């Protein structure tokens, strides 16, 4: 149930992006659901491999290269799915950052852990 809620939260975060960044466009809620699913798979499977391969550059930039990796993966998903548009690479980097902040905030707000401290 928690996985389904996280998927829906990520789709809502994607739908919020065009209202905050005019260089990002998404056609429908169904497209947002598909993009959220693909982004989840990409972040689960491909991102750890890319982070591991670029570890020296990430260490040299004190971790800032992770932002570029997130933007590249976001841009990759944009190119894979019709109905999801971003103006360019730097818009993808900004969109990935904003998407991460929105989805993290919504998850923290709506999916509070019921575990004792």
Image (cartoon, rainbow, N blue to C red):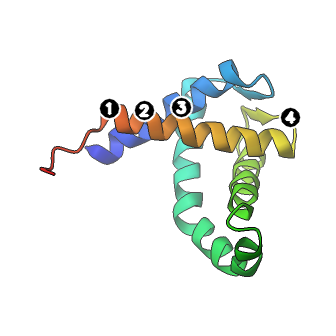
Label 1: state its secondary structure: helix
Say the numbered circle drawn on residue 87. 4
Q: CA distance from mark 2 to mark 4?
A: 25 Å
Q: CA distance from mark 1 to mark 2?
A: 6 Å
Instruction: Tell me, yes or no, whether the two marked residues, 3 and 2, touch with CB atoms within 8 Å.
Output: yes
Q: CA distance from mark 4 to mark 1?
A: 31 Å
In percent of width and height, residue 16 lies at 59, 24
In percent of width and height, residue 82 lies at 73, 37
Horizontal arrangement in the rendering, residue 113 relative to residue 23 (left or right): left
Q: Closer to the observer: label 4 or label 1?
A: 1
Horizontal arrangement in the rendering, residue 111 relative to residue 13 (left or right): left
Q: Is residue 111 above or below residue 51?
A: above
- The residue beneath circle 2 is 106
Q: CA distance from mark 3 to mark 1?
A: 13 Å
Q: Nearer the viewer, residue 31 or 48?
A: 48
Label 3: state its secondary structure: helix
Instruction: Tell me, yes or no, whether the two marked residues, 1 and 2, touch with CB atoms within 8 Å.
Output: yes
Q: Nearer the viewer, residue 40 or 30?
A: 40
Say the numbered circle drawn on residue 110. 1
- The residue beneath circle 3 is 13
């Amino acid at each position: 149930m928690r996985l389904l809620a996280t998927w829906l939260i990520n789709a809502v975060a994607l739908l919020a992006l065009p209202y905050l960044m005019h260089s990002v466009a998404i056609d429908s809620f169904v497209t947002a659901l598909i993009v959220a699913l693909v982004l989840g798979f990409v972040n689960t499977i491909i991102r750890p491999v890319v982070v591991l391969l670029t570890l020296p550059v990430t260490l040299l930039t004190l971790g800032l290269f992770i932002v570029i990796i997130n933007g590249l993966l976001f841009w990759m998903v944009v190119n894979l799915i019709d109905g999801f548009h971003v103006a360019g690479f730097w818009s993808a980097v900004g969109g990935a950052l904003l998407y991460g902040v929105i989805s993290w905030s919504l998850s923290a707000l709506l999916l509070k852990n019921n575990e004792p401290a």
